[in-house]
Image (cartoon, rainbow, N blue to C red):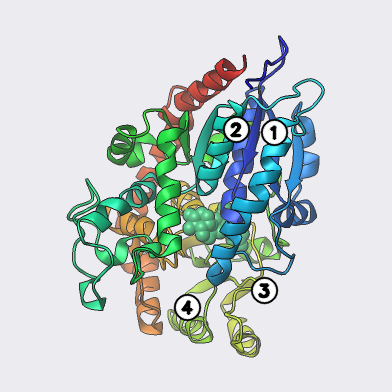
Amino acid sequence: MEKHVPHGCPPRVLLFPFSEQGHVNPFLKLAELLGLGGVHVTFLSTYYIHNRLLLHSDVQSRFKTYPGFIFKAISDGLPDDHPRSGEKSYEFFKALNVVTKKLLKHMLASDELGSDISPSVTCIIADGLLAEFTTNIATELHIPIIHFHVISACAVWALFSIPNLIENGELPIRGKEDMDKLVTGVPSMEGLLRFRDLPSFCRTSDVKDPILQGIARESRQCTRAQGLILNTFEELEGPILSHLRTHCPNVYPIGPKHTHLKLKLAKKEVISVQSTNSLFKTDRSCMAWLDAQPLKSVMYASFGSVAVLTRDELIEFWYGLVNSKKRFLWVIRPDFYKQGDDAKDVLAELLEGTKERGYLVGWAPQEEVLEHPAVGGFLTHSGWNSTMESAVAGVPMICWPRRADQQVNSRYVSEVWKIGLDMKDVSDRKVVEKMVNEVMVERREELVNAADEMCKLAVKSVSEGGSSHCNFDRLIEDIYKMNK
Ligand code: UDX
């Protein structure tokens, strides 16, 4: 039965991200943006995320200033030590679709997610990876739902096109010999995407693979939602956004979200000093180390919150960085090595050999690092948040994509936006050394010029009158309209 919101209540939006840093971070930025727009927010995450967030971030104190803000947790039915990613990710998806789905429906139906002033959820903003079951619940309970895909529009579009690729016989990929051939089944990307640039889920020999099928199904759910939010901007991905709009008419590109938030906070004269949405313990000592380095001299290396390296890959990257003779700051998370590999011992040796020109940390304040004047390049796994953060900071990239959307992002970085180099599927010390030198010296000017241009467009889009700024105003208006 449809619920009636008491007259005069502010809208209450439920935000529900997927359980990973790369999803939680942009969802929290969205939460702040909505809070600044007067919307009451309930931020729901699994206990696995909720507990880590409260431990390592400053969200609890920061969000106190937003009226009606509530943090809530929900079970995913898995034990604490379950990795929830990699080979076990299918188990995780299954648990969410069974355990979490049931709990969420109950919480929404019994108004457990509201407050005295705004008791009922009037709009759900759910992660694009959780789209199917949340949309089913929203439909049953007559609550409007908007999806938020934290990845690029080009990656969303490639995922959306998976059924086409299966239908036209391009999936499964026939073999290694086809990896450099061009794909025809992703409209508007013909002549650009090779098979190796397709989302990693496509690298399966069986098109009935449950992960491939699940991802394809989730990405098509946006046609059932009232809207689709993306952390991108019209000037960056306009042609792809037009394609998406033929299927999901109400698309809100409101990125780059971190810059958008920064400008809105500055306008309200809120200075957010060293705020963090981190699920890991941040080591800020690298900022003092960066302060002591010359201008644009440091290659920052980080592969995000999920990527895992083998012992051999770790060694190749280390030699590549050291042999390049450039300074480097490298994030090596404690869970960075493939289980069973004795990379920990190797690391101790590497650490000793790093002292001269390098610095290692377990987790860095990345946004601040990328904006530091000493940073001249970024060796990245091409997660979408990292890509946007680097582009806005005007820092050229070396891309080493690992999984999911990253293969598509890195292709766009190197071939369309021309703000970096794509090292996809190679982890050889000689190639690493060569690319570090290209980014830091040989091709520096052209890459930095392109990155600077991108940065200007990004800032314009989130400034008063810019495309993302206007799209966000429209989102807020639509959320208020749903509040009846
Ligand atoms: C995940 C997926 O893996 C990625 O493909 C998708 O695009 C987004 O969700 P993740 O792999 O963690 O994300 O990468 P990324 O999108 O780059 O997000 C990582 C976030 O953690 C960034 O916002 C980055 O600033 C932050 N970070 C990373 C830190 O704050 N410190 C670090 O040391 C490393």
Whether residue 107 is visible to the viewer of this picture, yes or no, is yes
The residue sitting at 47% across, 74% down in the picture is: 326
- Give the amino acid type for the residue marked by disc 4 in the picture: Leu
Going from N to C along the chain, the mark reached first, 1 or 3, is 1
Real-space Cα separation, disc 4 to disc 3, in angstroms: 20 Å
Few, some or many C-alpha atoms within 10 Å of disc 4 (few <14, some 14-19, many ≥20)? Answer: many
Select label 1 or label 2 by which is in front: 1
User: Measured from the top left, where is residue 103 in percent x and y?
Assistant: 71, 44
Select label 1 or label 3 by which is in front: 1
User: Measured from the top left, where is residue 292 in percent x and y?
Assistant: 62, 65
Going from N to C along the chain, the mark reached first, 4 or 3, is 4
Real-space Cα separation, disc 1 to disc 4, in angstroms: 51 Å
- Give the amino acid type for the residue marked by disc 3 in the picture: Pro
User: Measured from the top left, where is residue 101 in percent x and y?
Assistant: 63, 46
Of residues 151 and 226, the one nearer the viewer is 226
- Tell whether label 3 touches label 2 (CB within 8 Å): no
Give the secondary structure at mark 4.
Answer: helix
Of residues 104 and 447, the one nearer the viewer is 104
- Tell whether label 3 touches label 1 (CB within 8 Å): no
The residue carrying mark 1 is 108
- Give the amino acid type for the residue marked by disc 2 in the picture: Ile
* Mark carried by residue 321: 4
- Give the amino acid type for the residue marked by disc 1 in the picture: Leu
Real-space Cα separation, disc 2 to disc 4, in angstroms: 45 Å
Few, some or many C-alpha atoms within 10 Å of disc 3 (few <14, some 14-19, many ≥20)? Answer: few
Taking 370 as reference, is 257 above or below it?
A: above
* Mark carried by residue 124: 2
Give the secondary structure at mark 2.
Answer: strand
- Tell whether label 2 touches label 1 (CB within 8 Å): yes
